[in-house]
Image (tube, grey):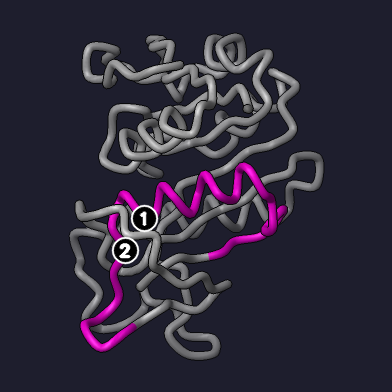
Amino acid sequence: MAKVALIGASGDAGSRILAELSDRGHRVTAIARHVERIAVLSGVAPKQGDANDRQALGALLEGHDAVISAVPFTASDVRTLVGAVRDAGVARYLVVGGAGSLEVAPGEKLIDQPDFPEAYKAEARAGGEFLDFLRDVDDLDWTFLSPSAEFVPGERTGRFRLGQDTLLTFDEGSRISFEDYALALVDELEQPRHVRQRFTVGY
């Protein structure tokens, strides 16, 4: 089992990833600004931390086999996060990505479609910039997992598809639950298949 540092452990995606890691027997340092919001689970050590404090965050990340980042892109900085992972000497870095940078047709990104909600554009744009930065990083074994267009609470079904840079759709649209997303991310942690790549998950 791995020793994993999870940044953003109390959020919508982070809390599901934390539960999945705990259920599979991993030892987790669960990092959040408000530790009281971190679920009490087996193998989990809650730690107060700020994703924008590189020095303090780097100290929290030391000694782990992998780091998972599940923080909003508009509330964090890719240089700070990558810098903290480097400072800590951790090689494996997994990122909860966004869907906006996925293509809906060759050369056409989801964020650029006329019906893309204005309220989500800032976060989607920041997520695309985060991914662009990672694509130039060659000293970390990073992975960026984009969800489908709808990223919502649901069930852990274990029935989903994986893709690369194209938005996955089905008859009812484009969707993945937080729970199945967490399953796919922890699968990638345990059996890396997309090192220094972005991939996506959807129904």
Name the residue beneath numbered marker 2: 176
Taking 159 as reference, is 152 left or right?
left
Q: Is 7 rendered above or below residue 29?
A: below
Position of residue 31 in the picture relative to residue 130 (left or right):
left
The residue singled out by tag 1 in the image is 180
Where does the image place residue 117, in percent across and percent down from the top left?
20, 69
Residue flagged by tag 2: what amino acid is it?
Ile
Give the amino acid type for the residue marked by disc 1 in the picture. Answer: Asp
Q: Badges 2 and 1: C-beta atoms under 8 Å apart?
A: yes
Looking at the image, residue 190 sits to the left or right of residue 15; the answer is right
Q: Alpha carbon of mark 2 to alpha carbon of mark 1: how far? A: 7 Å
Q: Which residues are magenta?
A: 170-199
Q: Secondary structure at mark 1?
A: helix
The mark found on residue 115 in the picture is none
- Which residue is painted at 33% across and 43% down in the image? 13
Q: Is residue 42 above or below residue 188?
A: above
Question: Image check: 92 left or right of 125?
Answer: right
- In the figure, residue 111 lies in which quadrant? bottom left
Q: Position of residue 163 (x, y in %)?
A: 54, 73
